[in-house]
């Protein structure tokens, strides 16, 4: 249970951080579509890279290997098996953590759930698991592109520093920013904050915002699989996510109906809305306007500061996690948010093919 | 697609606002459990009732009818079919809305999706659909109670008025408040706001908070069906919900790891945490602490104020929705939030039975 | 688990023989299709009727009630809820069987599985459960008809009497035969056999054959959901079925490849096969030829002859089941076989919409 | 769709005959179980080997590679990813078949379904796909063994030669027979038949029988997922299968109820039946007696005899398939039948954990 995502387009994921490989099967991808594998590798590289001194020391090349489902770079309609080998895993470093439940990590809960866990590098609870999502999402993105649908995510907040970005930036603008925050001023402040926290061996959270353009009206499956419900599911399934809001979000709770209602108008003989508090979704179904949402990430739990922990024998121990740690993983989450969103939208796109006679 | 919720415990829902009846099938409920049907009716009544002048004029008795799956008040392990008849539906009133796409309603998107829709009372997009959720959830609550798990939701915000409630209130405290907000001072301000908006024929949103106690460590199915991911899915599937956060939520994005990490300690030979920014979930799995989350509701779209709308023929029309309308449905959402949460937790409870050998 | 059938077109079934009602939800039926409800009632009547003295004494009118999903006789794309009330159930008659495990009935196994069972009229193991299948199947048939696909089943064997029917009969031919066996000579012998067994208070099995015409090439989802695999699943899920074969079937095991291979030829610029040992399916996918299969039914277990049984207290008891019993239910199984086949084919038809880009 | 099997225990399969590798993910296997990987490799070898001159010329070592889900030979409760590389695939040999629809092969139907197909070695329609089943099944067998459940299949018929085997043979007896038919006399006749057909470049079908012992009462999920229905689904999903029957099977259709009913008796304070026409299943649920069934295989379509075929351009061509071919693959199907049966039984075993409160 819990290792597959999607209804018609299904991503089945496997792999532990220090096992032989991580990967997955993407099932339900239509036949006959030419894929650009360099683009998929590009997305994997986006996930991996975190610039400068604030990144994890692990050097994975994360080279995609396609196992099935493709011939002459075209999809066969059969399951697309793929994997990335775990080259640089130093399991020995984790021996000292074998018996310890680190604060706010998944050590304790996985032990409780399964009675047995892979303690090396977080095992399956490692963020390396998101590799499979990025591969699947990168394929979905190419499908969506063929249908005029595009996605873009960016960092809109780190710590208490909020970017001032009012229109969805381009991928180039986002990628030119080392923190994937294309607001120069905010980015500078974020860097300063990260540098300061790096010295303190501390970490910090942030917010990723995402916008989807070109979604036709009609996607989403009420009543339980409303478009926003499955997006929320997708986002909250990403490590370290604490919240999701779309359209007006939490701020919408304080609004009046007369402010919040999006009036319909005709533009170029198409039905549009003058405002978009709905976030492109009404009654769980896309209305043709831009879909946008925010995803909140907590600070990562691995910090260099000494902490109290409990070991499996039930004794309290002092814990000082050595090595270099990410101060802030939120920039690396950007391609993951995009990947999950792409899987969701493509799945609903396929489903909509069967709703009308 | 989209009308079933759950993996082992499945709620299949059916029904339009003005059809013969609404109801569902609850499948996967274990055999041999004695149910208290007056408690289920009580939950239905909680959903229906909205006190005072600010409520919808429709008078539904919402009497539960059990169709199958029960003998001598005990579950048979077979599907529990149930329904509530639509007694007081005045479809004629909706004839004038037949061709109109109301702002921020689902009229336009349903028409786009299906090419044909039941315009009467919102059809399947009506909040009456939540009846089936409340019935299923009420049964799940009774199962959870047998295992020491309890849930309580309440209104924590209406408009820009926020309640000051620091510990989870009891059901009695919540139900004694007409707005389900057991902070007398805030409730008074909320009433004043609602009364003012009623006169203005306007509406307002709000926030429901929920806390779940007694959940054993080990529930939740990473990587895609993390406990919080399925809770978010459940909550965002409720009409008018715009956001979900659990534990530290969006505020957690601004925190440092050293602040946010929940240290483990031993209390009475059990592993607990000193703080609970994790919201009772680590790595997608419950850790035995209280689970708590917030759900944001937008203001309802039906307002008496005159608005611009578009009709199916593509013409702009003036829209003035007559009759009395709810100003704020958030208090009625409290039992719905609880119901969905109960379905989620019970489903994970059943799943956990098969994870260990 | 186990009460839903189908992938995109899903039938969720509920109901016990002596509960308030039996019914189901048909989900995934496309919107905008005009249904003929008299045809659906006709199929229900086909299921119910068994002519002459050899039928069960229970008089159910089996009147279909539509609960949702339909407006102006057209499908809304939302779940189609429906039920049939259990009017004539005489539960008292079953009090004497409350504690007894009847030979080759499901009393013992249901008790073992659930620890608690509805002993009245077989509870959920009653063949009345097939009502929901027939309703769902009747709707699927109408969809298939719109796409040029038709189904016909008939009785090809009762006891050791085999009909000599070489081409698929019409529905009229089948319905004009009281035993649904349009081979006059065989039917006469079957009647004689049934009459003889009625006097002996015994029962007998039989075989239903089914043919599906007009299925386009391309339906079926290898590798696990091959067309024949899902058909087999569907048929073996019907009460009393012991076997399934399609195309050459068991006899094909004794054939040589050179005999069994179906050569392709061009007819009217379409690819056909000269023989059809494949039964219209190759590699799990329809090839455009007729699909045909056989379903074996055991004799029903309820006989008037005195038998030995065991009660729940573990004592051996003599069992003499009173009242009139069906000698042979195979003719009544004909519409059920058709209904399940229709659900399978329609589901694959919908799935095929998403396999190509 | 169609590449996953199972409900709680799920096998997700991937791979084409001439792609990089074939494999799968086994999900839902409980944590903490020590697996014997030499036993799994042994099952893979059973699938591969076909003795003597009548076997396919392809020499695959079929070495199992575990990718995830295992640490220290124990299951982690996470997805078990695995694969077998396609070492010896000679794709060039298939270039001449690129455009040809071979009789009774899946070439035509796959082309119709997907519009694009991997023609090399049958692509995904190749029987090499069953590798993933055998691996998954071998793991399931080890789980079942821990719970006292064992399975054994054997060849009971080749062509028109039927073995005389009245009690379930041991694995040793089956494996000591080159044709997996532990009836010396029949085996001799079968060999003679195969030799004769090899000279004629022809092929022949057969029947595999399987018996499952030690299944506790209570497994199977009525109404749609009756134990026999899912077994039938499993078996008909195997390449070349044309029929399935269990217990009395097709012969049961000719029996009278008084003959067919299995009377319950008490033996050693346990409820048993004196006969077992039910095949160990009543009402879709296991009753504790042996489960047994037969699976019919057609002759394989690849024969050396010249045949007529059609190419993709719609022209009739003469087809002579070169190289050596299997005359009869039925002995190789024995471990596949066992594997699928093991997956089914283990899945139902897990499900039964949640049916009672």
Image: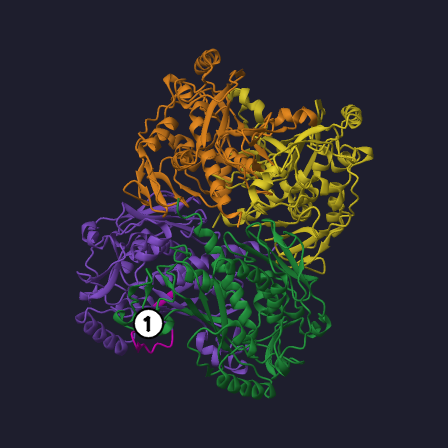
Chain colours: A purple, B green, C yellow, D orange
| Nearer to me, D325 or C96 | C96
Percent position of residue D305, x then y: 47, 19
| Nearer to me, D213 or D308 | D213
Tag 1 secondary structure: helix
Left/right of residue B14 with respect to residue A27 in the rendered view:
right
| Nearer to me, A24 or D103 | A24
Residue at (65, 81) in percent of width and height: B324
- In which quarter of the view is residue C93 placed? top right
**Residue C216 seen in render:** no
- Give the residue pinned by disc 1: B253
In the image, is residue A166 part of the stretch drawn in magenta?
yes
Q: Chain of mark 1?
A: B
**Residue B234 seen in render:** yes
How many marks the image carries: the answer is 1
Residue at (72, 71) in percent of width and height: B90
Percent position of residue A83, x then y: 31, 47
- For residue A96, above or below residue D115: below
| Nearer to me, D144 or C256 | D144
- In which quarter of the view is residue D42 placed? top left
Percent position of residue B304, x then y: 62, 82
Left/right of residue A214 with respect to residue B61 in the rendered view:
left
Percent position of residue C230, x then y: 55, 39
Q: Which stretch did the figure color magenta? A: A152-167
- Dot 1 crowding, Cα within 10 Å, few <14, some 14–19, many 20+: many
- For residue A326, above or below residue C20: below
In the image, is residue C312 part of the stretch drawn in magenta?
no
């Amino acid at each position: 249970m819990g290792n597959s995502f999607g209804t018609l387009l299904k991503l089945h994921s496997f792999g532990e951080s220090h096992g032989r490989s991580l990967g997955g099967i993407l099932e339900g991808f239509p036949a006959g579509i030419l894929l650009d594998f360099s683009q998929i590798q590009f997305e994997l590289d986006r996930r991996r890279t975190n610039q400068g001194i604030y990144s994890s020391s692990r050097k994975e090349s994360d080279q995609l290997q396609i196992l099935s489902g493709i011939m002459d770079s075209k999809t066969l309609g059969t399951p697309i098996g793929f994997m990335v080998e775990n080259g640089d895993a130093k399991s020995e470093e984790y021996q000292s953590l074998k018996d310890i439940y680190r604060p706010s990590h998944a050590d304790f809960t996985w032990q409780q759930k399964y009675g047995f866990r892979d303690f090396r590098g977080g095992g399956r609870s490692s963020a390396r698991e998101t590799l499979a999502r990025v591969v699947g999402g990168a394929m979905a993105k190419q499908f969506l592109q063929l249908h005029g649908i595009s996605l873009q995510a960016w960092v809109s907040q780190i710590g208490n520093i909020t970017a001032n970005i009012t229109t969805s930036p381009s991928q180039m603008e986002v990628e030119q920013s080392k923190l994937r925050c294309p607001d120069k001023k905010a980015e500078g402040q974020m860097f300063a904050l990260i540098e300061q926290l790096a010295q303190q061996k501390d970490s910090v959270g942030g917010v990723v915002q995402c916008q989807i353009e070109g979604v036709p009206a009609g996607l989403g499956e009420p009543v339980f699989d409303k478009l926003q419900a499955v997006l929320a599911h997708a986002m909250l399934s990403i490590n370290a996510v604490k919240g999701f809001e779309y359209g007006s979000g939490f701020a919408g709770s304080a609004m009046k109906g007369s402010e919040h209602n999006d009036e319909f108008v005709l533009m170029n003989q198409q039905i549009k809305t003058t405002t978009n508090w709905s976030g492109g979704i009404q009654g769980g179904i896309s209305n043709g306007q831009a879909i946008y949402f925010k995803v909140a990430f907590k600070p990562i739990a691995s910090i260099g500061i000494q902490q109290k922990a409990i070991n499996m024998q039930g004794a309290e121990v002092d814990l000082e996690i050595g090595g270099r740690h990410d101060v802030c993983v939120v920039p690396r989450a950007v391609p993951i948010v995009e990947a999950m969103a792409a899987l969701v939208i493509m799945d609903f796109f396929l489903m909509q093919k069967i709703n009308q006679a």
